[in-house]
Image (cartoon, helix red, strand yellow):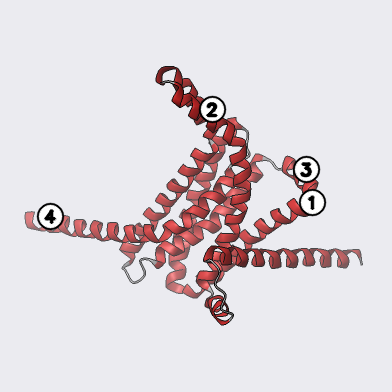
Amino acid sequence: MASGFFALLDDISTLMDDIASATKIATKNTVSLLGDDVAVNAKKASGFDSSKEIPILIAIIKGSLINKAILLPIVFILEILAEWLIVPILLLGGIYISYEAFEKVYEFVFTKKHKKEQNKELTDKEKIRSAIKTDFILSIEIVVMAISSVLGKPLYIQIPTVAVVSVVATAGVYGFVALIVRMDDIGIKLIQLSDKKGRFLRSIGIALIEAMPYVVKILSVVGTLAMFLVCGGIYMHKLEFIHHLLDMFEINIPILIIEMMVGFIVGGFSFMIKEGLVKFAGLILKS
């Protein structure tokens, strides 16, 4: 009986080691996605009233965890029954993200006043829903990347590994986002502590508070560019013919610029198609 118990413990220990090893590899492979995710989500989570930032961020985090809880079983089922569907779903998600980014660029350039009025009309709930929708697409990419790192391993290794990576990714991304959107509060806290600790903390606190408005503006730009990068990264990783075209025309441009260009082109085409369909539908309704 005792030997059977210790054999079970040994099996559990081996299983945990296998899961830890697989999680380490999967986490390493998904880290490259998290930089863009931080920029995109920080952009989505900023711009709220200071008193509402933490409750709204918590609501977005809950939505992100629900996204991953929904996605995990779906992606695993697709992997078993219809693996070919995963790539098209990712590509469609890339279209959604790039369209949203291109729409913001278009409205900033051509309809800036209208955009300002539109932003005033958006409620906090609408902004939260928009952030959670974008997170859903980013979550698909993280889950698929994590699964691709453990393909060929048994499901009892894949499932906990991808679940751990999803939770770690959520905690990491939104931990950084929380630090970014609460910079001013951190600055105030440092100023309060400076009475006991000296002028150095006060200087840092003042710098954080003064930098906050500029950080929000920078996030708006960087977040939009990151959305193009996310889309371009999906298309570059999943569509081999793009690499063949680059080789054919001997284009030697840094990969980040290429990904941004691809994302911009995808967003531009999707925006034009949508606008064309809207105008076409309007003409039919008038006639």
Kind of residue sitting beneath label 2: Ile
* Identity, as a three-letter code, of the amino acid under mark 3: Glu
What residue sits right under mark 4 in the picture? 5
Q: Residues within 10 Å of mark 2 (few under 14, many from 20)?
A: some
Coordinates of residue 31 in the picture (x, y in percent): 42, 56
Q: Can residue 51 be spotted in the picture?
A: yes
Taking the spot 62% from the left edge, 36% from the top edge, the residue there is 213
Compare marks 1 and 4 and give the one earlier in the sequence. 4
Q: Cα distance, mark 1 to mark 3?
A: 10 Å
Label for residue 125? Answer: none
Q: Is residue 25 above or below residue 242?
A: above
Asked whether 166 or 67 is in front, the reply is: 166
Residue 206 is marked as 2
Residue at disc 3, secondary structure: helix
- Decide: few, some or many residues near mark 1? Use Cα within 10 Å; few <14, some 14-19, many ≥20: few
Cα–Cα span, label 1 and label 4: 70 Å
Residue 116 is left or right of residue 62, and the answer is: right
- In depth, the one of 105 and 178 nearer the eye is 105
Residue 201 occupies quadrant = top left
The amino acid type, in three-letter code, at marker 1 is Thr
Mark closer to the observer (1, 3):
1
What residue would you read off at disc 3? 117
Residue drawn at (19%, 56%), measured in percent from left and top?
13
Where's residue 1, x and y in %? 8, 56
Residue 82 at least partly seen: no
Give the CA distance from mark 2 to mark 3: 32 Å
Say which label, 1 or 3, has the lower sequence index. Answer: 1
Q: Are marks 2 and 3 in contact (CB under 8 Å)?
A: no
Disc 1 designates what residue?
Answer: 111
Q: Earlier in the sequence, mark 2 or mark 3?
A: 3
Question: Label 4 vs label 3: CA separation?
Answer: 68 Å
Residue 149 is situated, as x and y percent measured from the top left of the image, at 38, 66
